[in-house]
Image (cartoon, rainbow, N blue to C red):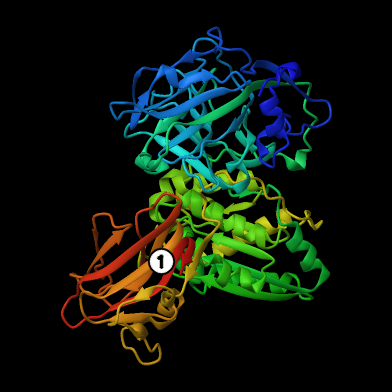
Amino acid sequence: MMKTPSLISSALLIACILPAAADESKSPNLPPLPAGQQWRMVWSDEFDGKELDPAKWNIQGDHVRKGGMWLKKCSLLDGQGNLKLLATKEDDGTYGTGAVNTKGKFEHKHGLWVARMRMPKEPGFWSAFWLMGNSVGKVGNEGMDGTEIDVIEYPKRTGELNMAVHWDGYGKDHQVRGTRHFDKSFTEGFHTYAVHWKEDEYVFYYDGKEVWRTNEGMISRVPQYIILSNEVGGWAGDIKEAKLPDHCLVDYVRVYDLEGAAPPVAEASKPSTHDPLVAEELRVRDGMPNLFSKLKAGGPVRIAYLGGSITAAEGWRVKTTAWFKAQYPKAEIIEINAAISGTGSDYGACRIAGDVLAQKPDLVFMEHRVNGGGGFEARSVEGIVRRIRQADPHTDICLIYTISEGMLKGLQSGKPPRFGSIMETIANAYGIPSIDLGVEIARREKAKTLIFKAKGWQNGNLVFSEDGTHPLEAGHAIYRDTVVRSMFRMMPQDQAKAHTLPPPLDPGCWENATTVPIQKATLSAGWKAVDPATDPVYRGNSGRTHQMLRGAVKCDRAGETITVRWNGTTLGLSDIPQGDGMELEVTIDQQPPITLKRPQTDKKQAYSRFFYLPEQAPGEHSAVIRIKSLPKGTSYYAGQLLVVGEVLP
């Protein structure tokens, strides 16, 4: 639309009074700022006039792009104050689209970048407002030398906005993080799409409201240029179904910098700056004020222990609970034992709601460093933290780091294992205290006052473990003592307060992970329910098996299937493998099937396990799990579904 009122046509004036949203307020909907700061416009184009300003824009084309061509004739001004990016079908059957950029004419670093746009109606192509740098194709600098910042991409016509950042080129090292935002309103009329590119994060806005923020890619530190484009591709549907020509309209593009000093940040609200690559016994951060407040008040206090076999053992967990009871005799200490041997943070994220949060804990100890996170370490740990905070912001969390043999030398040199560094990064962001029980063990072993791994009598010397992972009684006592002295150091922080919930470090974190009964899947006719009381395989390790399978089914022949539809990213299953020849064939979204081998590695019993299918892009998916082969005389046992997202009917 024209910015000069005298040039508004009578036809446009009539359109203004129609119900369509095309004449919404042209306010840029700038995000609010603290007192003392303001936005200062540093560049803009209102697209008035008859031709695109060559001092500001390069028109791209004519050349192949994706499933069509960028044609120069498809980028033009409509004479009503808009840039018009066309999508056309040419006489030779080629599909043409428009694209423009400011490369070499306007390149800028940081600031607020805003475009007011009206999206197309037809399928088969998508409109985008994005920022590019000249070195995005380089690998190894974590995006600091340039990041593709997709402020908005519009591939669907159902109210779906896509935002993303890409770095480290577009080959095998390519990295991408993104999200989707659903809002039917933007399918009609003009709306503003913006990104605030800060020094430490990107914040994305739709009509002035924040919809996503991320600090992935280490944040670009170089000037970047603007691209406005249409592109043809199957991501946006079938272009053959489109009634062309169609177009995207851009009312304006504006770039702002901040003026004025930001107000001082209160010390308590600053993220912790402890070095994740350095091992320390205790990092207090925001402490556990709510726990100590309740302990001193003398009411019921629920302490949950989430972890693996080290926590499941009658060791540091039991000893720590006993200390709390002795130290606070007027309080009713209620222990929540949510430890399952052989499981890490990934399985913990799936079961945190049912196994822990349903019992309303005041404190959650998280012990996952030894067992890991199944390849989803950062996402699962952050998912657990966020689920706890969302359930009750007054629940305190404490990360507990145990030790295995492979960590010993690193801790003795002051370096934590990789997973420990990942958890420390998350602890910094959320103000969570952490206690590294391995630091004291490593110190004693180095001083030769402890034997880390040995069997049997060792001439009276203290032995930590027989297998290099699971502590003996004396080892558990050292763990308990380390926890206790850390508690004394945190006790002064006893003023109850609600913990804040910052934006996620990883928008794909597992805060929506859950377990779902297998009965929610579609089962073929050969499955039957397992009787936990009588089934000999199930009862081989009944306590742990029931914790993992809960309502299991089994089949005794190949060819039986489990079909699951879900909306999300990741699907898994707990099961009991048997023998060496057990195989599953899995088909996801009708793609070529993959084969999963499910051998039983434990020689003494049928040990329950779990697995995940390959991670999928966010959205609706289906999987068919078929029993491909069974060793003679065995059955396949299927337990809970593990879902990042939700199971669909």
> Left of 507 or right of it: where is 334?
right
Regarding residue 159, the answer to whether it shows in the image is yes
Name the residue that disc number 1 marks: 342
Quarter residue 511 falls in: bottom right
Quarter residue 190 falls in: top right
Amino acid at the residue labelled 1: Gly
> Left of 333 or right of it: where is 473?
left
> Relative to 206, is 82 above or below?
above
Q: x, y (%) of residue 503?
A: 63, 45
> Relative to 234, is 91 above or below?
above
Please give the name of the residue rendered at 77% of the width and 27% of the height, measured from the top-left corner.
Answer: 262
Which is nearer the eye, 601 or 520? 520
Regarding residue 457, the answer to whether it shows in the image is no
Most extreme residue toward the left is 632
Please give the name of the residue rendered at 32% of the width and 77% of the height, measured from the top-left corner.
Answer: 637
Quarter residue 546 falls in: bottom left
Q: Quadrant of the N terminus?
A: top right
Q: Secondary structure at mark 1?
A: loop
Most extreme residue toward the top is 55
Which is nearer the eye, 424 or 219? 219
Q: x, y (%) of residue 422?
A: 50, 45
Most extreme residue toward the bottom is 534
> Relative to 160, is 6 above or below?
above
Which is nearer the eye, 57 or 291? 57
Please give the name of the residue rendered at 71% of the width and 73% of the height, measured from the top-left corner.
Answer: 326
Which is nearer the eye, 453 or 642? 642
Q: x, y (%) of residue 196?
A: 64, 30
> Label 1: few (<14), some or many (≥20) within 10 Å?
some
